[in-house]
Image (spheres, rainbow, N blue to C red):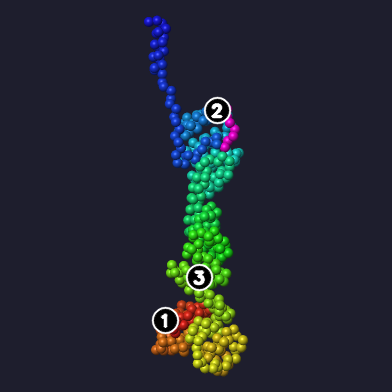
Amino acid sequence: MTKISILLIAAIALASCAPAPAPVVAPVAPQGNDRFIIDPRTGYDAQPTPANAKRFDDAWRAILAGDYTTARKKLDDVRAKEPGYAPLQLAEAAIDLRQGKTDAARPIVERVLSKRPRYTSAAVYAAEIAIAEKRTREAFDIYREIASRPGAPDFTTERIVELRTTLFDQMYNAALAAPGEESVRLLREALAINPSANPARILLAQKLVAQHKYDEARTELEPILNSGDVDRSEVQEALAEIDISRGRYEAAIARYERIAKRDRRFAARLDEIKQQYAEANMPPQFRRAIESESITRGDLAVLMYWKVASVRFASNMAAPPIATDIGETPGRDEIVRAMALGIYQVDQVTRRVGPYSPVNAGALTRITARVLTLRGASCARGAGNDPQKILAACAIVDPALGAGAESPVTGRVAAGVMEQVDRALSR
């Protein structure tokens, strides 16, 4: 064997013993939120030297593969040559974000953005940090700003839709539990994010109606009026209340009658509106009496006349006694009717009936019992002369109970008592 042959054999043997080159690790496609941690070079125009560009590309491939040790070594190699290359810093933040270390990534991203506020990759990282830290509104605003830039990442719209849904749900659910003004504010913000959310718009209108802000409520309902939701009971209810605020009782009654047919919960409110409509068309002395916080005998005579049919339509009355103190008193005709029916008596000495004298709860109890007795209520027969027993026999709530006999009486309370009297006389 020649010397050359021996050398060749030795070389082959040595080659067979040498270690094989390390395999190149292929990057794994990012999963979950990692897919939003984009290449740090996105949106950064300056280019490194070709050699460093190759090193950085290798570092990014290692990051995607999850080999952070190799990635950091490659990044250090680039940093030694070009320490001012901004994507180096973001690449470190990308590693932290993929490892769930938002506290470490945040200051890096903030420093980069303070110098380069239009740096797309840094803005995306800032948004993803905000999402991880539950700062949904901040993330939403950042992504909307990114979307306005040329060449925004393809997933930007997807992220905005996700964040809009999350943010809207947070605000809407918070509004459901919040008190009045706070609820209105949250609903307005929610609708600014998603103007097509009709349930939130309807709830906002209801809240505004409850606060008597009828014009604002009407404005909020405008987008619904030409939609399929316009016939929803809640919408018609709000529109009816707005009609009432403008004095359009007939329109309100028509709306409530439609919805009361399919939902009897609205029947009570319908009756209230009809009552209000009737009162709105009453003479001024009635409206004054029913709104009084402390009624007089004149006020009570007016309420008796308009609330009790047996008083208003009584016939064959005796001539009323002469009273010197009624003059041009508001409700004079109603007072004269009460005198003619014997409900009010004139003082024999002073010839006064006292139209301006206040009526307390005890006096209302006595006068109510007198009306029932004089107008022939069947329930009052056999109840004796005790006013409280007469009211109890006729199932009328005694106004003196609870409040006390000396307490003043409002027009609404007195009107309610007279309505009970009217029902008792009709039985």
Please, is residue 156 above or below residue 1 in the view? below
Q: What span is colored magenta in the figure?
A: 43-51
Q: Nearer the viewer, residue 351 or 43?
A: 43
Residue 115 location in percent, x, y?
60, 39
Disc on the earlier residue, 2 or 3 = 2
Which label lies toward us, 1 or 3? Answer: 3
The local crowd at label 3, few if under 14, some if 14 to 19, many if 20 or more residues have their Cα within 10 Å, is: some
> Which residue is identified by label 1?
395
Q: Secondary structure at mark 3?
A: helix
The local crowd at label 1, few if under 14, some if 14 to 19, many if 20 or more residues have their Cα within 10 Å, is: some
Residue visible at 44% across and 88% down in the picture: 376
Q: Nearer the viewer, residue 229 or 211?
A: 229
Residue 52: mark: 2
Residue 366 can be seen in this image: no
Query: Which residue type does callout 3 highlight?
Result: Ala
Q: CA distance from mark 1 to mark 3?
A: 33 Å
Residue visible at 46% across and 37% down in the picture: 30
Q: Secondary structure at mark 1?
A: loop
Q: Nearer the viewer, residue 422 or 240?
A: 240
Q: Residue furthest right?
A: 328
Q: CA distance from mark 2 to mark 3?
A: 78 Å
> Which residue is identified by label 3?
254
Q: Residue furthest top?
A: 2
Query: Which residue type does callout 1 highlight?
Result: Ala
Q: Is residue 47 magenta?
A: yes
Instruction: Please count the marks in the image.
Output: 3
Residue 60: mark: none
Q: CA distance from mark 2 to mark 1?
A: 97 Å
Looking at the rendering, which quadrant does residue 326 occupy?
bottom right
Q: Residue furthest left?
A: 1
Looking at the rendering, which quadrant does residue 118 occupy?
top right
